[in-house]
Amino acid sequence: MEMGRSWDTPGPDGKIFSGMLNPDKRSTWLSDTTSQPVSNFMGFGIDKKVERYVGVLDAEKFSGVKVYQGRGVGGGSLVNGGMVVTPKRSHFKHILPNVDAAQMYGTYFPRANAALGVNHIDQEWFESSPWYQFARVGRKTAHRSGFATTFVPNVYDFDYMKREAAGTAQASALGGEVIYGNNAGKKSLDKTYLAQAAATGRLTISPLHRVTAVTRATGGGYSVTIEQIDEQGAVIATKNVTADKVFFAAGSIGTSKLLVSMKAQGLLPNLSNQVGEGWGNNGNVMVGRANHMGRHRLHAVDHPHPRYRQLGRPHRVDLRRDRSPAGRARDLREPVPGDRQQPRAGPLPVQLRHRQGRPDLERVPEPAGHRHGQEGLRQDQQKKKAPSTAPTCSVCTRPGATTSPTTPWAAACSAKPPTTTGASTSTPASTWSTAPSSRATWG
């Protein structure tokens, strides 16, 4: 029984699946709006209105979590990234100590990988292909941040991808296809396991059939209640099938929901009380980095508070427009040619807090009599209001020195002129730059 449709018939455009950038009804499961994993970009939604249909990608919402699932013969393999990871042997032995690890790693994992068509990317091609420049940049950034990287085996045919890049094959992965299905190149389960099983003549797949109940049959075995639906999700028939054995293979969500329901209704009373407990995702944690069209970047200047000193990283961060060529990603400490450090619409302060063990901040002795919190704030305000007998520089705070503005973001001290690196103006380490309107708040 398969709740989704069989994805083997081309649509009006001659393709089985719709594209990711211009999705149609084939993209989404029984909804009038797409629900992309990245549903907002540049501050506005990118989901689109579509015709209600038994599309390939379902986004099921629960309390505090939204789970994406593939709908159709082939299940999640139709819409996932195709990654196939053999678990670390030490982890396997820890989680499943009663399973023969030697047999799994010597026989069954290799057999499964071969049947699935698992392959690895050509390392030389990866390093030179413009299609993977984004991944090389991500790898560089990860390494610079202290993270290790590795290559993950996949069921997408990398030899086919090379032909895509050469223009000798229909573009699929390189044509932006993934979450709504790949029209070529990908070895999803409907093309491997299920196709091999169907070829034996011992398997019949019934698409658009949804199991709603499983209970013990009177004469032995199990009774399975099934709803047949049309391509708009309407129930067109209800069926009951009796079987000696029933295998639940509806995915972590489908199987869990059905078992929890059967347990709660008393239809399968011998189920464990652990059914439905401890559910989790498949272990992937994905993060993304985007350079938005506004091309903002972070600029750093020394923070004037005497409790901290710089250890090679900024103490105050101002968010300003990035005027770097093409808005490309730049290192925070890298000077930007031609950048005047002018705000787009005023600075946006970033809240920074001192955390124990933070590598880029260090506690230093505080001024005598200094107080924290609201009392410290009042103390600082009183100092500002106190009359001075001599002019005081707002940069170095020494009597007799004066301040003259140089840019909207800094002030020059008459006692020690500012130093300039690239196009950014800053003061020597022994003084503080002042920009009252752009100082970050400290906790």
Image (cartoon, rainbow, N blue to C red):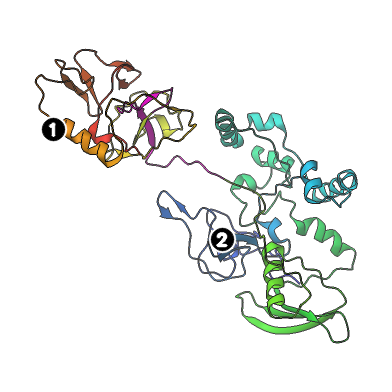
Q: Magenta stretch containing residue 366, yes or no?
A: no
Per the image, the residue denoted by label 1 is: 385
Per the image, the residue denoted by label 2 is: 66
Mark 1 surroundings: few (<14), some (14-19) or many (≥20) residues within 10 A: few
- Kindly identify the amino acid type of the residue bearing the numbered disc 2: Lys
Mark toward the start of the polypeptide (2 vs 1): 2
- 15 left or right of 390? right
Q: Identify the secondary structure beneath mark 1.
A: helix
Q: Quadrant of residue 376?
A: top left
Q: Nearer the viewer, mark 2 or mark 1?
A: 1
Distance CA(mark 2)–CA(mark 1): 55 Å
- 164 left or right of 289? right
Mark 2 surroundings: few (<14), some (14-19) or many (≥20) residues within 10 A: few
* One can see residue 337 in this view: yes
| Between 236 and 175, the one nearer to me in the picture | 236
Image x and y of residue 166, in percent: 66, 37
* Residue beneath the point at 55% across and 44% down: 287
Q: Magenta stretch containing residue 305, yes or no?
A: yes
Image x and y of residue 199, in percent: 87, 62
* Residue beneath the point at 49% across and 28% down: 359
Q: Is the magenta stretch mostly helix, strand or loop?
A: loop
| Residue range of the region highlighted in magenta in the rendering | 287-314
| Quadrant containing the C terminus in the rendered view | top left
Q: In which quarter of the image is residue 200?
A: bottom right
- Kindly identify the amino acid type of the residue bearing the numbered disc 1: Lys
| Between 257 and 233, the one nearer to me in the picture | 257
- The reply to whether discs 2 and 1 touch (Cβ–Cβ < 8 Å) is no
- 387 left or right of 127? left
Image x and y of residue 251, in percent: 71, 63
